[in-house]
Amino acid sequence: MRAGHASSEVKKILKQLNVEPSLVKRVVVALYEAEVNIVAHAYNGIASVDIDASRVLIRLDDNGPGISDIELAMQPGFSTASSTVREMGFGAGMGLPNIKNNSDEFSISSEVGKGTHLEFVVYLSSK
Amino acid sequence: METSTFHHALKIQSEVCIGCAHCMRVCPTEALRVKGGKARLQSNRCIDCGECYRVCPTGAIMVEQDDFNSIFNFRYRVALVPSVLLAQYPEDVSVEMVIQALLRIGFTKVAIVEDSVDYLITRINNYIITNPNRKPIISSFCPAIVRLVQVRFPWLVGNIMLVKPPIDLTSSFIRKKLTKEGIPQQEVGIFYITPCAAKIAAVKSPEGEDVSEIDGVINMDLIYNRTLHDIRSGGTKQSVENGVANLSPKSITWALTGGEALSIEGKSLAIDGISNVIEFLERMETNEVYGVDFLELRACDESCAGGILTVGNSFLTAERLRKQARYIPESKTGLLSQVKISEYGDMLKGRVGLSRLEPRSIVKLDDSMVKAMSKMERANKYLCYLPGIDCGVCGAPSCQALAEDIVQGEGFLSQCVFLQKIMEQNKLDPKHSFRIMKKIWGENRFTKDCDKPKRKKM
């Protein structure tokens, strides 16, 4: 599926559930960034979305090249993208920081040559 | 289901409706169902876009207008005419002839809706600059779009520009001007000649304003027929002020696709056709739209030139207006820009803004998230059994719509013809399933009929 498909599906569901727009926006933005990452680096991966009344939990797994220095990748503005990709409006180095900023819980693990596992949570009711 | 007091201009005439479900298939808000052999309109979902009107093969969908003779309840009768009316006529009918004919059939004054456009452009640009956090800003021009956003994209309601469309500004201005000329308020009747149903609904129950200054709405096709008949039967000529001569090129083309977008500073897009608009709004909702300042969104293909009550071909209408605009010097500006702002500026300043628009989602399954969640689970379960081919034989536009109707207590799984087949293998009496079908499609649908109306397109 193209990048943006999962976030658009999740958006539809959250809209039907009458979830507050600002929260949905955070989920959708974070998931969209993660989808773009997978399509750009790993070409394919699996997003699983679990929704209950208190939170949205999203897990993303891919078999891509992996990230050698996660700390560096988390720095705003750090990017491995070519200038052509940047001209297309991607590769600004804001992907991972954006996911973190839009989520309430965030974790990432990666192994070079194996793949990346990303997990984030957005709370739906104030805890 | 929510009940609503929203006025709709579109009405289904049950005695004419044959329950063919063509309308149900094209409705962008899934507002139609077939029951008892007739199409039924769910009022809280309908946005008066008129897609149903276009495909109805029997003319069962009508646009409710005011009685033409009600104009004679007023001593001063203003025809508020959108520029697209003037471009409907055959080539040999000039704008002056149309205006003369309007005066002869009973109006005492003709005003052009887009007269306030030049004034409005400044206000819109100003609004965009002062509301950077609401970008992209959605134009309030097309009332079907405003309602579409309210019901299907409730989160984007905050993006709709809180500036009134030209129709409201021009009618306020005319009323004020006539009052200033010493004509008593109650003797002035302003009648809008509408190219579409959505404008009628907007006048009768305005969104974001208390009352409309417009006293009545008359359909464009009716006015076209009356005026053309008058012109062809050679009514006596009387000299008139040419309303269009006062219009600027920007005003004349405002209601066409691109009319607004071209006048707005920054990155502006013009999108026409309701399915194009929906596709774009879906993207906007998932934050896939960057750096756009202004969106001109119109429900009809070719915008108002393609309104359901227009008579002429939409492309020809648009071409005529664009050509007219080319012959007018750029420096021309509308009446509102000509009159001293000191005289009317204060009055308009107070009237240019819309008050808050409210979302009224038809997408949510329940107000409570917990309830919505259990409804969604149930609907998803039903969807496992439904065939997913969206045939509409159940009387709902899609399997998803039927599943949602069931969880809202408005439908049954046994309406599905596929499930009936399965149930007949067990205990469902075929006679009973036949009764279910008759309940949806009416008694007559199952008798031989060689004179069924043909589909409109193909």
Image: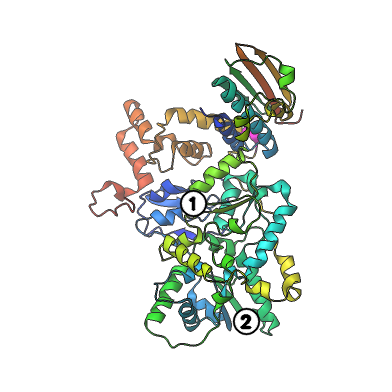
* Labels 1 and 2 within one chain: yes
State how far apart marks 1 and 2 are (Cα).
39 Å
Image mark 1: chain: B
The spot of residue A50 in percent (x, y) is 61, 24
Q: What element does badge 2 sit on?
A: helix
Q: What element does badge 1 sit on?
A: loop
The image quadrant of residue B180 is bottom right
- Asked whether residue B212 is in view, the answer is no
Residue type of the residue flagged with mark 2: Glu
The spot of residue B159 in percent (x, y) is 66, 49
| Circle 2 Cα neighbour tier, 10 Å, few/some/many (<14 / 14–19 / ≥20) | some
Residue B34 vertical placement versus B180 (above, below) = above
Q: Nearer the viewer, mark 1 or mark 2?
A: 1
Judging depth in this view, the residue of A86 and A42 nearest the camera is A86
Residue A13 vertical placement versus B60 (above, below) = above
Residue type of the residue flagged with mark 1: Gly
Residue at 69 percent of width and 76 percent of height: B339
Image position of B153 (left or right of B84) = right
* Residue carrying label 1: B273
Q: Taken as a whole, is the magenta stretch helix, strand or loop?
A: helix
- What scheme was used to colour the molecule? rainbow
Find the magenta span and give its range.
Answer: B368-372
Q: Does residue A80 belong to the magenta stretch?
A: no
Earlier residue among tags 1 and 2 = 2
Image mark 2: chain: B
| Circle 1 Cα neighbour tier, 10 Å, few/some/many (<14 / 14–19 / ≥20) | some
* Residue carrying label 2: B187
